[in-house]
Amino acid sequence: MTRHDHPGPAPAESVRPLTAGPRWYRARIRLFGPVLGLLPMAVLGGIAMFALQVGDGRSSGLIGLIGGVSAAPGLLVAGAPLADDGPYPLAVVASIPLWLVLGLIASRRATARSLASWRDYHRELLWLTIGVVLGAIGALIAATSFLGRSLIL
């Protein structure tokens, strides 16, 4: 009996994950998931910027404000919409780690099951994104009640 006819463990090179197999998908989701967590921020921020650039009314201001603070919760810390806009770019950059962590959490939760897919990842990230958006809206409502006037004039 030669070494290759031996029924023992397989050589190390054949233990690699099968391309497009379950372990391969899990590895891809865990690798790219944190970076893909930036996607909701980019989409929400783009919608907010577009609304503020195109319109000058109450509805475009509301979309811009809610979309902006949802995409970059650091804007709330920087005093948006009441403070001057000098620290806004830094507040947007400071929000990036939040979305990276949310992408990481979504990737870990999606790959907790042995058969993970990108659909699982997107579902997990959607729930986390909804939580951030509701938190931002709640902070804006609290600021409105505390100040006693509307933030959208």
Image (tube, grey):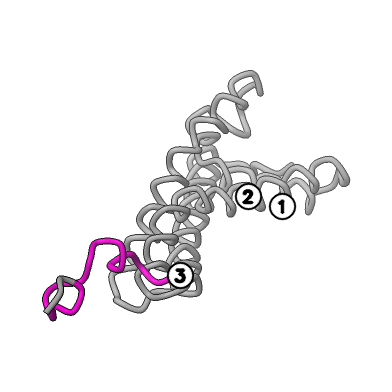
Quarter holding residue 23 = bottom left
Vertically, is 148 above or below 23? above
Give the number of marks.
3
* Residue 86, horizontal then vertical, whole percent: 64, 18
Q: Nearer the viewer, mark 1 or mark 3?
A: 3
The secondary structure making up most of the magenta span is loop
Amino acid at dot 3? Thr
Question: Label 3 near label 1: C-beta < 8 Å?
Answer: no
Question: Label 1 near label 2: C-beta < 8 Å?
Answer: yes
| Residue 53 located within the stretch drawn in magenta | no
- The Cα–Cα distance between marks 3 and 2, rounded to whole angstroms, is 42 Å
Amino acid at dot 2? Ile
- Nearest to N terminus: mark 1 or mark 3: 3
Numbered mark located on residue 66 in the image: 2
Residue that mark 3 sits on:
19
In the picture, measured across the screen, residue 51 lies left or right of residue 26, that is: right
Question: Label 2 near label 3: C-beta < 8 Å?
Answer: no
Mark 2 residue crowding within 10 angstroms, few (<14) / some (14–19) / many (20+):
many
Q: Farthest residue in the top direction?
A: 86
Residue 83 or residue 3, whichever sits in front: 3
Tag 1's secondary structure? Answer: helix
Extent of the magenta region: 4-19
Residue at position x 18%, y 79% from top?
A: 5
Amino acid at dot 1? Ile
* Residue 44, horizontal then vertical, whole percent: 65, 51
Residue at position x 79%, y 48% from top?
A: 51
